[in-house]
Image (cartoon, helix red, strand yellow):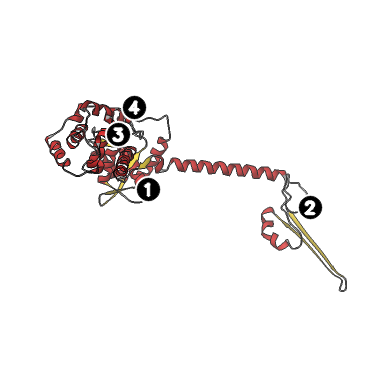
């Protein structure tokens, strides 16, 4: 308790006055501003409650017991720990911890493993994760066609993807005009995936290894492919005035072919390696690269994984880093021609 006493005397009329008040630590904060005009008040903490109440001396301003100092330090440490934990949790659950944005408006996953025990679960978990991230980053629903294309960009698409996506959408998405948002059940599933994504000991099926293997199917061209190539070589490209002879490796020729088809002409988002090679040698007559070296460059994941990505159907496309690299050739060529 905190005690306050006031005594007054008045000589002519023999007037006297006494006032004794006691306040708890909580109450003293409320009346301090009123009583502060009479005497400075500082709450006093009693280490041990006695059976006989005693009047406690009023302490001078700013005097603090060591017990209070240690308690304040403990509280500050606890608050700092909670703050750091909350910040760490927030970062671990941010879409940008798992995806990068590319120049075409797609989200590119930083990891292919969504902790699914089979390919179907990996695909459905990717779809959930992608819709969750897209909703938060772009503040809008995801078009179904965009999601299909995003699966190709992220190398998880195959002939079963559309069927598995429909199954997932019926239970986990709010569907409106062909676009998806998470429903409460979908959000709950995402929360589960987020927790598992942070478990480094938990592994999903490595579907990406099977799709990275070189296959002769990538060079097999259809009659339709041949017709498309003939149409593409008639289209204008900024590389028409570029001296392709300055490219000195098969990897650079592959970069040129993929960039021309997917970014410059924008006729496909990903392409067969055989189609890319045929387009390259027919479009640019001075190209000196063999089909075999072209294929090895695309399949060399050790040296060129940062440049080339591959869908589960064996189609190739460029990474954002590769796109920037090729665009630097155009910029340099433009300066040289000025």
Residue carrying label 3: 308
User: Residue 33, image x and y in percent?
Assistant: 69, 61
Distance between the Cα atoms at labels 3 and 1? Answer: 26 Å
Nearest to the observer: residue 13 or residue 63: 63
Residue for point 16% across, 38% down: 229
Q: Earlier in the sequence, mark 4 or mark 2?
A: 2
**In this rendering, position of residue 223 left or right of residue 276:** left
How many labels, in total? 4
Asked if the residue at tag 2 contacts the one at tag 4, i.e. Cβ–Cβ closer than 8 Å, the answer is no
Q: Residues within 10 Å of mark 4 (few under 14, many from 20)?
A: few
> Which circle, 3 or 2, is nearer the viewer?
3
Residue for point 68% across, 44% down: 69
Q: Is residue 298 above or below residue 1?
A: above
User: Residue 249, image x and y in percent?
Assistant: 28, 29
Q: Earlier in the sequence, mark 3 or mark 4?
A: 4
Q: Residues within 10 Å of mark 2 (few under 14, many from 20)?
A: few
Asked if the residue at tag 2 contacts the one at tag 1, i.e. Cβ–Cβ closer than 8 Å, the answer is no
Q: Can I make out residue 210 in this image? A: no
Q: Which mark is residue 137?
A: 1
Distance between the Cα atoms at labels 4 and 2? Answer: 78 Å
Task: Provide the secondary structure element on which disc 1 rests.
Answer: helix
Q: Earlier in the sequence, mark 3 or mark 1?
A: 1
Nearest to the observer: residue 164 or residue 298: 298
Q: Earlier in the sequence, mark 3 or mark 2?
A: 2
Distance between the Cα atoms at labels 3 and 4? Answer: 11 Å
User: Residue 34, image x and y in percent?
Assistant: 70, 63
Residue carrying label 2: 57
Distance between the Cα atoms at labels 1 and 2? Answer: 61 Å
Task: Provide the secondary structure element on which disc 3 rests.
Answer: strand
Q: Which mark is residue 302?
A: 4
User: Which quadrant of the structure image shows residue 305?
Assistant: top left
> Which circle, 4 or 2, is nearer the viewer?
4
């Amino acid at each position: 308790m905190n005690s306050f006493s006031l005594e007054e005397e008045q000589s002519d009329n023999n007037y006297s006055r006494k006032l004794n008040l006691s306040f708890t630590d909580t109450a003293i904060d409320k009346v301090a501003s009123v009583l502060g005009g009479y005497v400075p008040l500082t709450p006093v903490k009693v280490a041990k409650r006695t059976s006989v109440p005693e009047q406690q001396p009023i302490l001078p301003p700013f005097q603090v017991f060591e017990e209070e100092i240690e308690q304040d330090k403990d509280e500050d440490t606890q608050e700092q720990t909670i703050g750091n934990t909350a910040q760490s949790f927030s970062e671990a659950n941010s879409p940008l911890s798992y995806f990068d944005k590319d120049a075409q408006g797609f989200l590119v996953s930083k990891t292919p493993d969504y902790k699914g025990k089979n390919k179907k679960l990996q695909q459905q978990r990717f779809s959930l994760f992608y819709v969750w991230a897209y909703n938060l980053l772009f503040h809008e629903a995801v078009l179904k066609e965009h999601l299909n294309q995003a699966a190709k960009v992220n190398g998880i698409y195959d002939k079963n993807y559309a069927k598995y996506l429909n199954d997932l959408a019926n239970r986990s998405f709010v569907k409106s005009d062909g676009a998806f948002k998470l429903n409460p059940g979908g959000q709950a599933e995402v929360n589960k995936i987020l927790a598992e994504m942070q478990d480094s000991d938990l592994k999903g099926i490595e579907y990406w290894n099977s799709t990275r293997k070189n296959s002769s199917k990538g060079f097999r061209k259809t009659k339709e492919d041949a017709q498309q190539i003939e149409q593409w070589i008639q289209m204008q490209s900024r590389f028409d005035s570029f001296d392709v002879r300055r490219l000195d490796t098969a990897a650079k020729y592959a970069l040129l072919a993929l960039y021309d088809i997917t970014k410059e002409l924008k006729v496909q988002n990903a392409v067969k390696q055989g189609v890319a090679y045929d387009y390259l040698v027919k479009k640019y007559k001075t190209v000196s690269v063999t089909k075999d070296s072209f294929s090895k460059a695309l399949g060399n994941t050790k040296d060129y994984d940062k440049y080339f990505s591959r869908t589960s159907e064996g189609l190739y496309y460029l990474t954002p880093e590769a796109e920037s690299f090729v665009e630097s050739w155009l910029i340099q060529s433009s300066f040289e021609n000025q």
